[in-house]
Image (tube, rainbow, N blue to C red):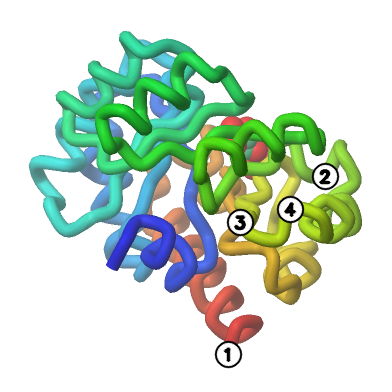
Amino acid sequence: MSIAEQFAALGVVPVVVLNDVKDAEPLADALVKGGLPCAEVTFRTDAAEESIRIMAQKYPDMLVGAGTVLTIEQVDRAVNAGAKFIVSPGFDPEVVDYCIEKQIPIFPGIITPSEAAQAVKRGLKVVKFFPAEQFGGVATIKAMAAPYTTLKFMPTGGVSLKNLKDYLSCDKILCCGGSWMVKGDLVKAGEFDKIAQMAKEAVELAKEIRG
Ligand code: 3PG
């Protein structure tokens, strides 16, 4: 299965911010136990690269990628650590073109038709839509998908159990990203059982919606 097909099968992609590499293994374990063996580990913290390495080594079947990737140097660091995909919050042509050239799956963020056009021009089939809730959520995605018929969207930003159904009911949406099942305070408190439970709820709801 391609990365996009794996995202679609799960329905949700956990967006992870780790401050301490010691949390990488128990977090991966919790996500696997919760039936959501996937993580977008964001390069917002210094722990990202090593956390990806630990997760990819300990759980080789897990779909581990890097998020908040802003530079090609971070692309290299992420991929060398074992990231299977790259996500960026915005559309940086340099980063996108570099990933395409190296055949690294890239899911850049877009929010406007002009950026959608840039993605389509490069043959991308899936883009992140960020920040989703703040920019009109599913209604905006539907409007944007009308002219850009080949694109599928991965909305992130403000998605939760409360609005997951609205998003996943739209066939232009591949899957949703979000941090609600991997909340920073739960990670900090070492409440990995709770994270496993929330991951399970998320993936079960996604399956129920998608049928
Ligand atoms: C991201 O980088 O994709 C977002 O920060 C995640 O948004 P959320 O925390 O609202 O789920």
**Residue 90 shows in this picture:** yes
Residue 189 visible in the snapshot: no
Q: Secondary structure at mark 4?
A: loop
Q: How many marks?
A: 4
x and y percent of residue 131 in the render? 74, 35
Residue drawn 83% across the image and 60% down it: 146
Residue density around tag 3, few if under 14, some if 14–19, many if 20 or more, within 10 Å: many
Of the numbered discs in the image, which one, if any, rests on residue 166? none
Residue labelled with disc 4: 148
112 in relation to 127, above or below: above
Residue labelled 1 has its Cβ within 8 Å of some atom of ligand 1: no
- Residue at image mark 1: 211
Q: Amino acid at mark 3?
A: Cys
| Label 4 or label 2, whichever comes before in sequence order | 2
Cα distance between the residues tagged 3 and 1: 16 Å
The three-letter code of the residue at mark 1 reads Gly
**How far across and down, in percent of the image, does residue 34 sit?**
37, 67
Mark 3 vs 2, N-terminal side: 2
Q: Position of residue 145 (x, y in %)?
A: 77, 57
Say whether mark 2 is within 8 Å of ligand 1.
yes
Is 124 in front, or is 69? 124
Q: CA gap, disc 4 to disc 2?
A: 20 Å
